[in-house]
Amino acid sequence: MLLPNKRIPLMLLFAVSFVVAQEGLNFTVNKQFYLKGNSVLIGNNIVSNHALEPFNDRSVFNDKIKLEYIDVDEDKSTFSSSQAVLTLPPTSKKIVYAALYWSAIYKYDKGVKRTLGDQIVYKGNDERSLDVHKILFKLPNNDYEDLKGIKIYDSYNNAQFNDTKPYVCYADVTQLLQNASTVNGNYTVANIRATEGFVSGGASGGWLLHVIYEDDSAKPKYFTTYNGFTEVNKEAVDITFKDFRTDEQAEIKTALSLGVLEGDQKFKTDACYVMHQDSESFTPLSNTLREDSNFFNSTITIGDKYFKDRTPNSINTLGFDLLKTDIPNPNNMVLSNNSTEMTIRFKTKADRFYVFFVAFETEISPILLESKDENLFMTTDTKTYALPQQKDLDKITALKSLSIPGLEKGYYLVTNVFSVEANATKWKAFLAEKGHTPKSYKNPKNNWDYIYLDMSEDPNDVYLKQRELSKLDYFSDVWILKINM
């Protein structure tokens, strides 16, 4: 179904279906945007084998390396710091959203390992700070400013992840970037906490900055990010994205951005899959830098290139993975025209890993953007069918009336909108098969076909009919338009 732009606030609780039997915190939707634009992902790790020098050795296991904080800012008041460069294109118009995430393995401040017989034992003082949400953030050509984020998940005070005690934090930095005199340039994040030395499985940690911006030269897109933390170990984890509709014609382009901890490049079998909608089969993602059987391999990549515009620019980021990748969609096999959802799957056999960030974007029907100019009423309550509340009727009568020549005045119950007339015809035929009597009109403003099932000058009648139809599973949404009144 089409989800007109004014529907967005009502859908935040339903945007992502998340199925997981692992430990952690189930993801919930954080932000959704429908706009012409693009996104950028930058970031860096925060622990390595040297405070300043890049680490490029890919022949050793993470937990064999004694790690220390990266600290590149030449500021004695910070104990950790790393940098990355943000470059928005000249066509970028406005930053709509900017989010900073940081995550790390943090069982204790410092750890050692000992060999006892044929076993390796990891020990630490079992003490560490609980203020993992307090860091320093520096924009280009600026000084550090204190940043107090939100603890999305910290496993230190519960029984989960006893060997590693990971955490993830988040801060909305949109206003900081919007008000900055210089946006493009070097960003520094300091005083992120992680375990130094040794810990079971290897220490890791780092940060990312995800920026969504408007660009009038881009196609309409749907963007979503959400917060949570989950372990991928013995069972697959599926995420299904919803609340969008792809275009009725043309090739559909889509992309995925991920942040993952503990993807040891020496261990194989970790993978990320996408589901083909028609066959419901899964195909693993891969590119020249990420094998399908070792997708999370301790690197920071954009597409099929290493993201090197950072300090230090290690090839091996020691268990901290960041990536943005296009999802291959030949002949629209993964996301077809008029698609309304997409599923990805995380899976591993040997290399346990933690997902702490996911962002999804896809090209959508332009109807989703242009319909924002229309005043409409929608309801999602399908559990009860009491009489309409006066507040609901007041909202309907207060709608701004649209002018459509040749139509009777009244409130119209619209089920779908199409820019391609053949698709409108198919939808009407489908509704007729279901026993409905669909009608349609063309909006002279955009020449799109609006398919409706009922109309009345009485808002009460149309409201009750809307709630009745919303019980049916083939109606994702049905909305009310006020016309010629």
Image: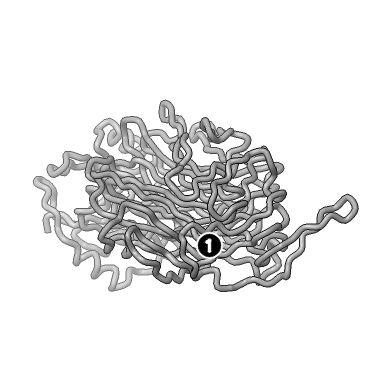
Q: Give the position of the C terminus as an image quadrant.
A: bottom left
Residue 345 seen in the current view: no
User: How far from the left and from the top, in percent, is residue 182?
Assistant: 28, 57
Left or right side of 283 for 252? left
| Farthest-out residue, right | 117
Residue at 38% across, 42% down:
362
Left or right side of 151 for 369? left
| Farthest-out residue, top | 331
User: How far from the left and from the top, in percent, is residue 94?
Assistant: 25, 54
Residue at 52% across, 38% down:
274
Question: In the rendered view, would you say 330 is above or below 324?
Answer: above
User: How far from the left and from the top, in percent, is residue 368?
Assistant: 28, 47
The total of numbered circles placed on residues is 1
Q: Give the position of the N terminus as an image quadrant.
A: top left
Residue 331 seen in the current view: yes
Residue at 59% across, 52% down:
50
Mark 1: secondary structure:
loop
Crowd tier of the residue under label 1, counting other residues whose Cα lies within 10 Å: few below 14, some 14–19, many 20 or above: many
User: How far from the left and from the top, in percent, is residue 292?
Assistant: 59, 33
User: Badge 1 is on which residue?
Assistant: 80
Instruction: Look at label 1 and name its amino acid.
Output: Ser
Q: Work out whether residue 394 or residue 198 is closer to the camera in this orientation and state it.
A: 198
Q: Work out whether residue 7 or residue 405 is closer to the camera in this orientation and state it.
A: 7
Question: In the rendered view, would you say 219 is above or below 251?
Answer: below
